[in-house]
Amino acid sequence: MTGTTSAPGPAALRAVDRGRSLEDSVVVVTGAGGGIGGATARLVLEAGGRVVAGDLRPDALGSLRGAWGEDRLAVGLGDVRDESTADALVAAGVAAFGRVDSVVANAAVGFYGGILDYSADEVALMVDVNVKGTVWLARAAVRQFRAQGGGGDIVIIGSVAGLLIGGGKEAVYSATKAAQINLGYALDRELRSEGIRTTTIAPAGVNTPFAAADGRFGDRDPSEGDFMEPEDIAQAVAYTLRQPRRMRTELWTMWSLSETH
């Protein structure tokens, strides 16, 4: 008996989007002088992309500057608490490379201790860097994405501390991270119809000087435990940016095997 095969329908004939290459993609990364931001900038550059690396400290960007030329890397210095810094980083991408495809809001500050252990300045710094700094970058990105057309990506580096599970010594930090997560969800609902995707990546403990600061893990040193590495989070950022335009990731939580909720 001879079988027959039906002709493929329109859906089967449709070209399948296998994902976006990072080659020549222009990505703005804040806090790119080290840790997760530095790892993200390096991974994008190694994948053939172009990066606008932002940081508060000029010396922190020295290794990136030494490894990559101006045809692939632009540098922007400034305090993310100031709206003008975000505007300048996006403008630097347009000036150097003609467009901006994605932004990664990575810059963050955390102090750890009881609610009365923070100074007023430390509280203000966490709120201003973590919350306002993310808002300013998102606003600058949306203006540019709308001007150039074609959508874009906003990636927020949050924390599992913002998921109603913050530790007893990180109340204010947890509050700022919860604000980032809720900002990400709301922006997704506001912007996705324009092809602008918003993703929050929320890792647990990562082996960085930031994570080891101020006794966040007590006597444990992230460099000596089974914590995640900055490159692990950078890989998640890269996967998010490479996703086919038909899909999006709202929230991605990441834990090492050694950590409990």
Image (cartoon, rainbow, N blue to C red):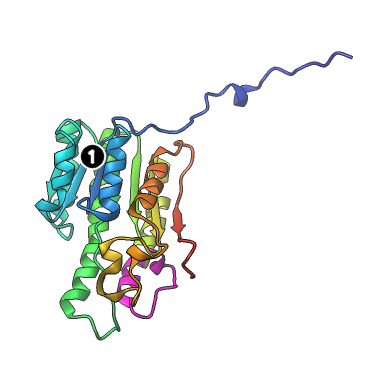
Residue 88 visible? The answer is: no
Question: Does the magenta portion include 222?
Answer: no
Between 85 and 10, which is closer to the camera in this rendering?
85
Q: Position of residue 42 (x, y in %)?
A: 27, 42
Examine the rendered structure and indicate whether residue 6 appears above or below residue 143.
Answer: above
Instruction: Say which quarter of the image contains residue 94.
Output: top left
Residue at image x 25%, y 49%? 38
* Label 1: how many Cα within 10 Å (few below 14, some 14–19, many 20+): many
Q: Position of residue 79 (x, y in %)?
A: 14, 57
Between 58 and 190, which is closer to the camera in this rendering?
58
Instruction: Say which quarter of the image contains residue 150.
Output: top left
**Left or right side of 216 for 81:** left
Find the residue positioned furthest to the front: 224
Residue at image x 30%, y 36%? 46
Badge 1 amino acid: Val
Between 69 and 96, which is closer to the camera in this rendering?
69
Question: Does the magenta portion include 176?
Answer: yes
Instruction: Say which quarter of the image contains residue 2.
Output: top right
Examine the rendered structure and indicate whether residue 75 appears above or below residue 134.
Answer: above
Give the residues in magenta: 159-177
Examine the rendered structure and indicate whether residue 150 appears above or below residue 207.
Answer: above
Residue labelled with disc 1: 51
Residue at image x 25%, y 74%? 214
**Left or right side of 168 for 7:** right
Examine the rendered structure and indicate whether residue 167 appears above or below residue 100.
Answer: below
Mark 1 secondary-structure assignment:
strand
Q: Position of residue 144 (x, y in %)?
A: 24, 40
Find the residue positioned furthest to the top: 2
Locate the N terminus and report the quarter of the image it occupies: top right
